[in-house]
Image: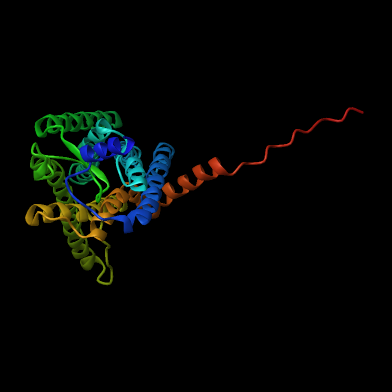
Amino acid sequence: MEDTASTALDDSLTCPKVYDHANLQLPRTILSTLISLFVISGNSLCLVCLRKSQAFGGITRVFMTSLTIADLMMGVFICVPSSTSATISGWVLGYPTCLVTAHLNFYLVTMSVLSLLLVSLNRFISVVRPFWYQTITPSQATVTVVVSWVMALVFSLVVLFTCGINVCFDAMLNICIPLSAQKELGISISTVASFVVVIVVSYLLTIGIYVRLYLIARRHLRQMNNREANDNPAGHVQLPLNKATITFAIVTVAFGVAYIPMILIAVDYFITETGCQLLICGLAPLCTLSNSWWNVAIYSIRNAEFRETMKHVLQSAFIRRPRPQRVIPVVS
């Protein structure tokens, strides 16, 4: 009777696909666990460093904090259940949890992209409208972030109630996904359309802003080189791009690279209506979830002050300094 109940649970939650992924169970379990640890510990450390470090401006830190919180929540609410599911090859957390994680995944990815967009807009305004940028305060940036989180939440709830509350656990992708009203049709078309409109368009807009900043920098470079050629023919001016701008451009590109495998899988599914190969489907979600800790690594590699702050925080947490010995005066 216990086996029957277990089978009924699997039938109600597992997507209507048949997978033979036993060969990937052990490596996926190990990788999923490591990714969860990296995402949670890395972004927790990043939050502390953003509070202590002056490596980035106040407004930039607000938007970076928003991105870090989204990544941290991704680790807690998506990576950890995914690791548990990879270990036992099934979803045992119940249907409500599967429903929440399926739509929370969409919500957090949306917030990651919107945070990247806010960072790029911050960079763009500082270059194109420097005097106006000086009037913007961290408090105003915080209000912008809060409004973005609320708007993304409202949109996610609209998607939830519009597309229906049918979800299932995809044993190959190792995540819960929204289904269409007719479960045999697979993943909800409305959900994918919403994903494309909000996330892909926002991401492409972010990339476009960095391309625009690069073109502006190139134009300034030509102007400075022409001026330098007249004053000093042997002189040469480097590309006037702020190092922080390049850092955030790398973070944005890394985000796209991490999500390319999952996007290709979705496109291939709608074209061929067949599942992807075992290795690709098994490792693509791990690549996507890994993006949540890549940002921390990029910050520490690209910014020396942030790296030093991180090192100081780690030393304070794990290396105990010897207590000063109390000197007792000798009474003669």
Whether residue 84 is visible, yes or no, is yes
- Residue 272 image offset from top left, x and y in percent: 8, 57
Viewport quadrant of the N terminus? top left
- Residue 103 image offset from top left, x and y in percent: 21, 36
Whether residue 296 is visible, yes or no, is no
Number of numbered discs on residues = 0
Q: Residue furthest bottom?
A: 234
The residue under the point 20% across, 55% down is 260
Which corner quadrant of the image does residue 100 belong to? top left
- Residue 148 image offset from top left, x and y in percent: 20, 32
Which coloring applies here?
rainbow
Q: Residue furthest right?
A: 332
- Residue 217 image offset from top left, x and y in percent: 20, 56
Front-most of residues 220 and 197: 197
Viewport quadrant of the C terminus? top right
Which corner quadrant of the image does residue 72 belong to? top left
Front-most of residues 75 and 272: 272
Position above or below: 25 against 118:
below
Position above or below: 98 against 207:
above
The residue under the point 74% across, 36% down is 325
Instruction: Tell me: 298 left or right of 11.
Output: right
Instruction: Tell me: 61 left or right of 140.
Output: right
Which corner quadrant of the image does residue 141 belong to? top left
